[in-house]
Image (cartoon, grey):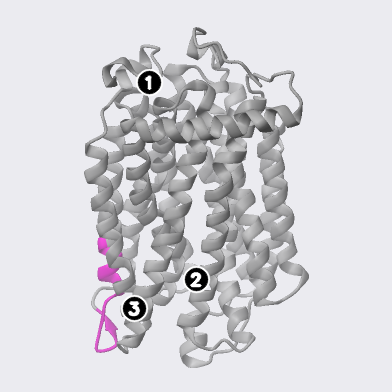
Amino acid sequence: MTVVDKNVEPTKIEAKRTHFGNVFLWSSYDAADTLFSQGIISIVFQPFVLLLAYEQGITNYWTAFALMSAFMAFSNLLVAIFGPIIGSISDTIGKRKSAVLISASLMVISTLAFLIWRNFWWLSIMFVFANFGYQAGRMFYDSMIPFISKTDQRGITSGISGSLSFIGTFAAIGLAQVAYSIWGKFSEPGKVFEEGASISYTSLEWLTVIVIAGILVFTIPFLFSKEKENPNSFSFKQNLKQARLEFKDTLKEIFKYKNALLFILGWFFVTDASNTTILYMQLVMIDGVGADPGQALMIIAMGGLLSMIGAIIVGVLLDKLGPKKNFIINIFAWFIAVSIAIIACIEVDGKHIVPWQIMFLVGFFIGIGFGGIWLIGRQFVFEVAPPKKVTQYQGFKQIAGRVSAIISPIMFLLMLGLGAKLGLSISNQYAIALAPLLIFFTIGLIIVLKYVDVHKEYLAGERAPYKKLQ
């Protein structure tokens, strides 16, 4: 069993200097996993799996959407269950970079397996594994920051990685445009289900291949990055035993530590709504608002550009203002974006009440929100977690994020189904499905306002649990 000396300065195991060349090498993985998020999750998987469902005889849009959402929810459930446990193992062993690479390998191999068999069920199962690898890798990657950057430069470090991550967004958009120009645009799922339009998804298959190639290229610089490791000399079995003990201890600690609990609860509600917004936004734009795939990509591109700029600004503001104030601003940006998207989906007498171009305004506010939310979440963890438990707290943050990624899509699905039962058009169904997200943002804001700001103490070198909270 590992014995921890409680008299040891808590920041001893953290990085004391920031080498920005190393930060850029580390940040390359942010571009890689963002390329997966945008290229595979947002652009490829959803229309691909819906078209395969129709091709295999699932001709009801709501049923196909429900099955797709069930697999996505199950994948997030796996992350919620195992995230803190593998995070605890990583903290105990003291190495995070290798865990990122193992997770990335699972993500890449499972995604390539999409193409082995054109089958709805096979694609859905492979997505479960690919998404698990993506989410686990994200957790380990975020946890590396205290071990590559000193205290007062972690916000800007996050900002650099956040801004570079949008290279992945632009790469996804550019690669999609290339795929569409060579192999044609894929069929719009809404038209296929409503009108029986012909099915084409060849461009999605080729896009999968070139996105994975891009991910591998972006990951190369990360291989040369370095973190401050704090390994021990114990066997894997001893580390596993210690990790279980640490996991139980951390779970009790979070429920006793009000600030950590408030953060996790607030994070749950806000990411619940923001994840669902991002998850279904391409389908909202195409099937809900009436934009075609090319127009949807233009909106995503604009949002990506704003997110890149916003990430740098948020990174600087995080060091100065801390995560709480930044989070409040972020929540308002998401609230405005979803409100406009709801209006854009509404149809009266078969016509939208506003033109699809209003979605550029949605892209503007989502750009602000998406550019900062993950950086803010990282900084919250650094400030509420003891240094030796950063990855474990990231794991519990993942529980909040992944459980919310199960609950909100289910609610989205139920509201979509309600609209279908009422005989509404697919566009109006999306308007109804988006509405509950505003409630989640509001609840999250109320909880975050109760969080006690400890940013000044953190910058001064104090670490959780803080004296002012005891």
Sequence-first tag of 3 and 1: 3
**Could you tell me which quadrant the N terminus lies in?**
top right
Q: Earlier in the sequence, mark 2 or mark 1?
A: 2
Q: Say what secondary structure mark 2 lies in.
A: helix
Residue 280, by quadrant, is bottom left
**For residue 470, side relative to residue 371 (left or right):** left
Q: Which residue is mark 3?
A: 429
Label 1 Cα crowd, 10 Å radius (few <14 / some 14-19 / many 20+): some
The numbered disc on residue 147 is: none
At label 3, which amino acid type do we have? Gln
Q: Closer to the camera, 9 or 202?
A: 9
In this picture, which residue range is highlighted in magenta? 339-352
User: Which of the numbered marks, if any, corresponds to residue 465?
Assistant: 1
Q: Is residue 299 magenta?
A: no
* Residue highlighted by disc 2: 293
**x, y percent for residue 336:** 25, 55
Q: Report the mark closest to the observer, 2 or 1.
A: 1
| Image height of 365 relative to 284, above or below | above
Q: CA separation, marks 2 and 1?
A: 49 Å
Residue drawn at x 64%, y 49% as measured from the top left: 133
What secondary structure is marked by label 3? helix
In the rendered image, residue 167, in percent from the top left (x then y), is placed at 55, 45
